[in-house]
Image (cartoon, rainbow, N blue to C red):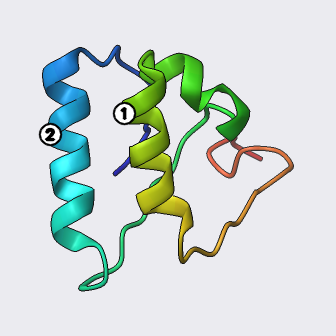
Amino acid sequence: MDDFGLVSFDNNLRLVLLQILEDCYGKSSTIIDSQLPIKNWYDYLNDPTLADTILNRLTAKHNRFELKGDSLRKKS
């Protein structure tokens, strides 16, 4: 998932995301990139129960990379 957090999630999108993560869990890798800090994901998902479930699927077996520094898209 590219640029997670750019658009608002309604209940249908939250459920679709959960279903995708549930289908992939233990079978394949999931990569999410976002400009939204992880600490804000609960507020962004705007449903504590679904946020817990979604984040549980993402963090049960995960590697997290937090990049810092200037954007590589900036021209020299």
Tell me the mark number nearer the camera, choosing from 2 and 1. Answer: 1
Q: Residue furthest front?
A: 49
The residue that label 2 is drawn on is 16
Say which quarter of the image contains residue 28.
Answer: bottom left
Residue 64 relative to residue 53: left or right: right
Amino acid residing under circle 1: Leu
Amino acid carrying mark 2 in the image: Val
Answer whether labels 2 and 1 touch (C-beta < 8 Å).
Answer: no
Picture coordinates of residue 26, whole percent (x, y)? 31, 83
Q: Residues within 10 Å of mark 1 (few under 14, many from 20)?
A: some
Q: Nearer the viewer, residue 56 or 63?
A: 56
Q: CA distance from mark 2 to mark 1?
A: 11 Å
User: Which x, y percent locates residue 25?
Assistant: 29, 73
SS type, badge 1: helix
Residue carrying label 1: 50
Relative height, residue 31 to residue 29 (above, below): above
Marking on residue 62 = none
Residue 52 in picture, x, y percent from top left: 49, 40
Q: Quadrant of residue 64?
A: bottom right
In the displayed structure, 49 sits above or below 7; it is below
Going 54% across and 77% down the picture, which residue do you hit?
61
- Closer to the camera in the image, 52 or 12: 52
